[in-house]
Image: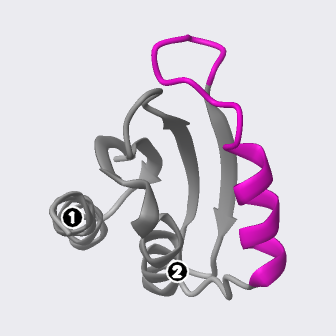
Amino acid sequence: MSKQIDGWIMDRNLRAFLELLSRYIDYAFDDTDWDTIETGVRDTDDEKSDGWYSYPLVGTSATLEVGLARSVGSEVMSVSVTGVETLELQLRTDTLLSAFAGI
């Protein structure tokens, strides 16, 4: 059963979060992904329904849709990950969000 996991991280941790999440689904996250995402999130706003940026991570073990939006006026990035199907991936995703929110 697919689940959506929502949370937030410090925006300075976004690349590390995405790289680790990609590793968990056997996706080769690279500089092209990062450049696309960095540009895509530039003008986002988590308080607007149409202010989110969405990026697919298509790995060999899962396909995730990552929604991202800045919390304007802060250093926080809101994150929503959909397509999380296994309990293991749910725990890993939730743990990543918790870890990168605090550092």
Task: Looking at the picture, tell me which residue is in the foreground, 23 or 62.
Answer: 23
In this view, 100 is above or below 22:
above
- x then y, percent, for residue 85: 37, 57
Q: Are marks 2 and 1 in contact (CB under 8 Å)?
A: no
Q: Which residue is under mark 2?
A: 19
- x then y, percent, for residue 9: 32, 53
Residue shown at 71%/58% (left/top)? Answer: 38
Q: Amino acid at mark 2?
A: Glu
Q: Nearer the viewer, mark 2 or mark 1?
A: 2
User: Horizontally, is 82 left or right of 26 in the view?
Assistant: left
Crowdedness of circle 1 by 10 Å Cα count: few (<14), some, many (20+)? few
Q: Amino acid at mark 1?
A: Leu
In this view, 3 is above or below 88:
above
Q: Quadrant of residue 94?
A: bottom left
Residue 74 forms part of the magenta stretch: no
Task: Looking at the picture, tell me which residue is in the foreground, 94 or 73.
Answer: 73
Crowdedness of circle 2 by 10 Å Cα count: few (<14), some, many (20+)? some
Nearer-N-terminus badge (2/1): 2
Seen as rendered, the residue at the extreme front is 73
- x then y, percent, for residue 92: 24, 72
Task: Give residue 87's mark.
Answer: 1
**Mark 1 falls on what kind of element?**
helix
In this view, 60 is above or below 66:
below
Q: Which residues lie in the magenta part?
A: 31-51
- x then y, percent, for residue 43: 70, 32
- As measured in the structure, the alpha-carbon distance from the residue carrying label 2 to the one carrying label 1 is 20 Å
Q: Quadrant of residue 51?
A: top right
Q: Quadrant of residue 102?
A: bottom left
Residue shown at 56%/87% (left/top)? Answer: 26
Residue 33 forms part of the magenta stretch: yes
